[in-house]
Amino acid sequence: MTGMLETVDPQERFLEFFKIEKYRQRISQMAISGRESIMADFEELLAFDQKLTEKLLEKPDEYLKHANNAAYAQLQIEDPEYAEKIETVTVRIVQLLETAQLRKLGSNNIGRLVMVEAIVVRSTPVRPMVMQASFKCKRCGTITRIDQTGQFLRAPFECSDPSCRAKGPFEFVQEESAFIDSQDLRLQERPEDLPPGQLPRTLNVKLVGSEIVDVARPGDHVSIVGIVRAFAPSRPGVGKLRTFILYVDANSIEVLGKEPEATLPSPEEEEKILELAKDPWVHRKIISSIAPSIYGYEHVKEAIMYLLFGGVPKTLPDITVRGELNALLIGDPGTAKSQLLQYVARIAPRGLYTSGRGTTAAGLTAAVIREKGGGMNLEAGALVLADKGVACIDEMDKMRPEDRVAIHEAMEQHTVSVAKGGIVATLNARTAILAAANPALGRYEPHRTVAENISLPVTILSRFDLIFVLRDVPNKEADEKMSEHILEIHRKGLSPAEPPMQSELMRKYVSYAKGIRPVLTNEALKRLGDFYLAMRSASEAEGSPVAITARQLESLVRIAEARARAALRKEVLAEDAEAAVSIMKRSLEEVGIDVTSYKMDIDLIMTGKPKSVRDRLQIILSTLIEMEKETGIVEKVALLSELESKYKVSRGESERLIAQLLREGTIYEPRQGCLKKT
Ligand SMILES: Nc1ncnc2c1ncn2[C@@H]1O[C@H](COP(=O)(O)OP(=O)(O)O)[C@@H](O)[C@H]1O
Ligand SMILES: [Mg+2]
Ligand SMILES: [Zn+2]
């Protein structure tokens, strides 16, 4: 019986498969949609004929050909006219039972059909590829056609005219050649598939055919079924290398949903989660479960909690408002910033840790990269790869100049646009950002403004919902507690305090909570509104600093929503609004704003200068301009005495402000001791 089955012609078996009603329908509808391929479900094929399916996995080149021929034969029955027109049908297999792990692909997979799920990091534009090339003999003018398969364009061995048989020269005739659309992608392991502490691996994929090119963009998560192949890169003048490089010839591609894979909690875990959420101290418990080995920083951990859960994005017909929170930690070296970031990247669903420079050529946003052959590639950077997740950016102050420009759009609109080298694209970057930056002067100087302390433009600073300063100041009592804590960790090799929630459960808790979209209650709305209006009215008097802007109001809403989510509540209560106001106040205080008097000066963040300083800078500038009109070049000493006598600005203060203007590039020193406005 089994012997008989094996002798059945595989093409016949495929033909029987395509006679199943569902596939007959698909085939008969090909003409309507103008398709030249049909999808075949792996599982259905398996249920139909297990042997055939095994062969398909083992020898896909041969068996896909049988499948294609069978589908074409069925098309000749269903729609002979269309069959006449398209000449071939491609069968595309989707959803194999198993996903091959990208990092485990190796020589034993070569020639086999596999499915990989990964993230697209790089793509070329769609390019025509020659399938059949026509060459004209320069002696007699005869055209010789050569089917193309390899990597390089192959010319005829000799002229096909029997009376000529010249071995060249030949001329490639584009109009008489047959082309097909092709595209190369580079896949990378998804952050969630990555073993902790490992760098992601990549794999190149070749797409051929108008129905599978241009389906996925960098940043998309895809499932690709294809044949594993290897090619030997050649070195000019040396020949082919013995070590081959793996790539995949795609048979089908599907773009997967963008939500991070929710690792569903088991029934027991779900019970634990619901139990925790009912606890009136749930927020405290979450906070003390965040990086338990790191001592103190309760407020920073509270901010991290809000960032993990996030607010609710709003999509209105005309605008969208992000739900994700951005937080920045500025701090002295050795204040556990990197440790906190790495911890968050580990527990956040689709968390990603990167340095400001990024780990790839694409940096934080995206880049168009010229490949060796001269073609252009679009490559996704960290924020695009962490789409719908949390990007932890260490040493953000050291980001590439290109990213400084592009990151504004990424942080507010949550997209990254690229237009360069013929590539125009907008990629999604719906990412919560937890960033760290080191003070520009080595240590944080509290008497200077935030903008003066770090080398990030204020336009970027103002896009952070919360900013905290971590300072390393000696304090006997705190130092004792901290050293005790750290030494305890080193003695026991574990955290001194057992966290209420282990990180595995925490990740599931966060995923679970993300499904809730809390709505603001009237009481919560009132608390937020009152705070905002109080701040605004404090600055109504003419000339007084602007306390707070609409940006902060949106931040408050996000924080309050995140807090409700953390308790798995569908409603944002007054207590959430109050907590949001209090952490916002704390953040504003940390950046040097006096909250108690209600005289907050958001200009400090927006322009990097408190109003009083701005006024004085203005005086210095206008005095300089006045004096320039008289003398052309202004001696610094002359300016200093003018400022002292006329405006009562002390020499020390003037010196400091002049140095600041020089740093900013508002003025410059044409020669030693002289000043001029730029
Ligand atoms: N509050 C703290 N609790 C526990 N360990 C700390 C604390 N502050 C600093 N450390 C330790 O000091 C070291 C330096 O931390 P790191 O994250 O590299 O600092 P940063 O990135 O701020 O320069 C780490 O080993 C960290 O665990
Ligand atoms: Mg660090
Ligand atoms: Zn010829």
Image (spheres, rainbow, N blue to C red):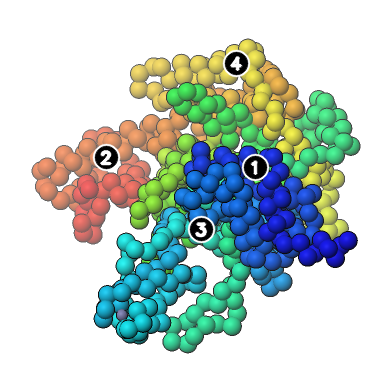
Residue position marked by numbered label 3 in the rendering? 208
Q: Nearer the viewer, residue 219 or 257?
A: 257
> Mark 4 = which residue?
525
| Residue 114 in sight in this render | no
User: Pointer 1 and pointer 4: residues touching (CB < 8 Å)?
Assistant: no
What residue did someone put label 1 on? 24
Amino acid type shown at disc 4:
Leu
**Mark 1 residue CB less than 8 A from any atom of ligand 3:** no
Residue 300 screen position, x and y as percent: 65, 40
Q: Earlier in the sequence, mark 3 or mark 4?
A: 3
Q: Is residue 275 above or below residue 171?
A: above
Distance, label 3 to label 4, CA atoms, is: 55 Å
Lateral position of residue 312 relative to residue 152, left or right: right
Residue lying farthest bottom? 238
Label 3: how many residues lie within 10 Å, few (<14), some (14-19) or many (20+)?
A: many
Q: Position of residue 480 (x, y in %)?
A: 76, 50
Q: CA distance from mark 2 to mark 3?
A: 65 Å
